[in-house]
Amino acid sequence: MTKLTRFDPFEEMRALQKQFFGDDWGRPLADVANIMPATDVYTRDDKEMIVEAHLPNFEESDVDINIDNGALVISAEKREKEEDKKKKYVVRESSSSFYKRIMLPEHADEDKVDAHLENGVLKVTVPFKELPKPKKISIKKKR
């Protein structure tokens, strides 16, 4: 008895993708989300916006924080370089990076932004400018 195998026209393409890009090519997005660092953006008492980015293994010198055209831009890059004369390769490099751009509200006080990196969590605090109170107009009686 002969065993029939179903023909898959894309199997060869998947094998090439696996060969060039590795085993995780085409992984579901849920799996990729587990690799991406978590970023939380929230407001506290309508007085400030807090951005918390989980950046394990990054040092302060690896992280850049800028304000560009009304947006908070956080980028981090870590490069490791290792030279080992006993092994066949000359240089072994690895890198990891992070980039996040968050639009700031109009009333953000860009001059008073504060940032701290502690235990792998970057916390950026953006205070809000106090909005002018509405002006009360009294109604006068006509004489």
Image (spheres, helix red, strand yellow):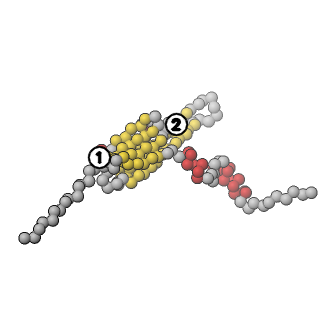
Asked if residue 84 is positioned above or below residue 94 in the image, the reply reads: above
- Evaluate if marks 1 and 2 touch, with contact meaning CB atoms under 8 Å apart: no
The three-letter amino acid code for the residue at tag 2 is: Glu
The three-letter amino acid code for the residue at tag 1 is: Asp
Q: Looking at this view, is 25 or 128 the one in front?
A: 128
- What residue sits right under mark 1 in the picture? 111
Asked if residue 94 is positioned above or below residue 16 in the image, the reply reads: above
Image position, residue 120 (x, y; %) = 47, 37
Image position, residue 118 (x, y; %) = 43, 35
Return the residue found at the far top. Answer: 86
At horizontal 41% and vertical 52% (from top left) the residue drawn is: 102
Q: Looking at this view, is 60 or 133 the one in front?
A: 133
At horizontal 55% and vertical 38% (from top left) the residue drawn is: 93
Residue 73 in sight from this viewpoint: no
Q: Residue 130 got which mark?
A: none
Which quarter of the image is occupied by the C terminus?
bottom left
Image position, residue 67 (x, y; %) = 35, 49
Q: Quadrant of residue 11?
A: bottom right
Which quarter of the image is occupied by the N terminus?
bottom right
Q: CA distance from mark 1 to mark 2?
A: 34 Å
Q: Quadrant of residue 105?
A: bottom left
Image position, residue 87 (x, y; %) = 63, 31
Crowding at mark 1 (Cα within 10 Å: few <14, some 14-19, many 20+): few
At horizontal 33% and vertical 44% (from top left) the residue drawn is: 113
Asked if residue 9 is positioned above or below residue 31 in the image, the reply reads: below
Q: Is residue 134 left or right of residue 7?
A: left
- What residue sits right under mark 2 in the picture? 80
Residue 2 in sight from this viewpoint: yes
Q: Is residue 135 left or right of residue 120?
A: left
At horizontal 20% and vertical 59% (from top left) the residue drawn is: 135
* Secondary structure found at label 2: strand
